[in-house]
Image: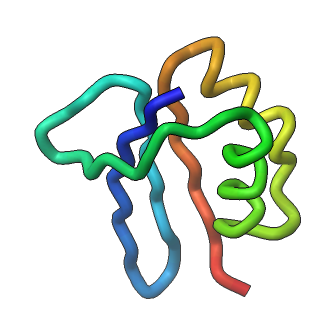
Amino acid sequence: MKIWMQDTQSSSHRLIRLNCEEHSEYVYVGDFDSETLKSFFLELQPEMDAEKNSKLLNYYGYLHLFILPK
């Protein structure tokens, strides 16, 4: 699955928008298989449910992740 990403960071949170279609404001991050995608999610946030988010991205074609720093 080809993934494009837009990453917005502030002092209080990080918003990551993933999409399976090319968008002008998004950066191409690569062509992932399911295992690589799960490890990508765990790099973003170790306690994330990578299996669930992988299925959501597959089904909808996009995924927005709201990450709070610890």
**Residue drawn at point x = 39 percent, y = 74 percent:** 9
Q: Please tell me which residue is depicted at 64% across the width and 19% down the height of the picture.
A: 58
- For image coordinates 86% across by 37% down, the residue present is 51
Q: Is residue 63 above or below residue 58?
A: below
Compared across the picture, whether 16 is left or right of 49 comes to left
Give the left or right position of residue 66, taking residue 20 as reference.
Answer: right
> Farthest top residue?
59
- Looking at the rendered image, the quarter that the N terminus falls into is top right
> In the rendered image, which quarter contains the C terminus?
bottom right
Image coordinates for residue 26, horizontal then vertical, percent: 25, 46
- Tell me: 10 left or right of 1: left
58 and 47: which is toward the camera: 58
- Residue at horizontal 41%, vertical 32%? 19
The spot of residue 15 in percent (x, y) is 46, 59
Identify whether 60 is placed above or below 39. Answer: above
Q: Nearer the viewer, residue 66 or 27?
A: 27
Residue 32 image position (x, y, % from top left):
59, 39
Front residue (pair 31, 22): 31
- Using the rendered view, name the quadrant where residue 68 is placed: bottom right
